[in-house]
Image (cartoon, helix red, strand yellow):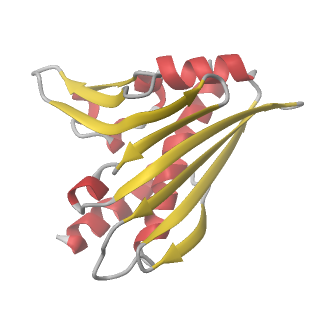
Amino acid sequence: MRRSVLAFLLASLCSGPLSAEVQHVANTGFIVENRIQVSDDVATTWQTFVEEVDNWWPKDHSWWLDQGTFSIEPRAGGCFCEMASDGRSAEHMRISFVDPQKMMTMTGGLGPLQGMGMFGALTFVFTENENGTEVVMTYRVNGINPDGFAELAPIVDMVQGLQIGGLKTFLEAN
């Protein structure tokens, strides 16, 4: 199963631009960080992040591709969820902290990491600056992986680059 998950994640890398930095790898997990800079103000960036996630999150990083609809409930206990038209649903992550227009933290395991028993904290920090807004996406993942995390961390990092890159691309197009 580990090889099929790695193959899936590697195949995902071919679907768009990458911006990646593995910050730390240990025996029990890893930390990855991706940054984007957009010209929009922080209020617009936050609103798009929360209210239009279905438009910017890459559909090839979902359970049901174009059949799924993403949503974020921006409150503690809220859900970053996906619903299929036939009633299937998935909780990608649980919202654990919200400071509107500044920070949101979600917890859980994204995609194949759920099935691997991985758990993490995914934090988005929004900072307005002279060029618009910088969004920093940091994922701290822990768990047990018999093969370690040296190969997995860069793959997850690149996929995260695609995901946050979707927000940048959507904002730049609108």
| Residue 32, picture quadrant | bottom right
Compared across the picture, whether 39 is left or right of 149 comes to: right
Front-most of residues 102 and 150: 102
Rendered location of residue 67, percent (x, y):
22, 27
| Residue 21, picture quadrant | bottom right
Q: Is residue 143 above or below residue 107?
A: below
Check the image and name the residue furthest to the right: 130
The residue located at (54%, 28%) in the rendering is: 98
Which image quarter is the N terminus in?
bottom left
Compared across the picture, whether 54 is left or right of 20 comes to: left
Front-most of residues 131 and 79: 79
The residue located at (37%, 80%) in the rendering is: 148
Rendered location of residue 108, percent (x, y):
35, 47
Q: Is residue 120 above or below residue 126?
A: below
Q: Is residue 57 above or below residue 154?
A: above
Do we see residue 16 in this rendering? no
Which image quarter is the C terminus in?
top right
Compared across the picture, whether 68 is left or right of 25 comes to: left
Front-most of residues 84 and 122: 122
Check the image and name the residue furthest to the left: 86
The residue located at (44%, 58%) in the rendering is: 13
Figure label count: 0
Do we see residue 128 in this rendering? yes
Rendered location of residue 105, percent (x, y):
51, 39
The residue located at (33%, 51%) in the rendering is: 109
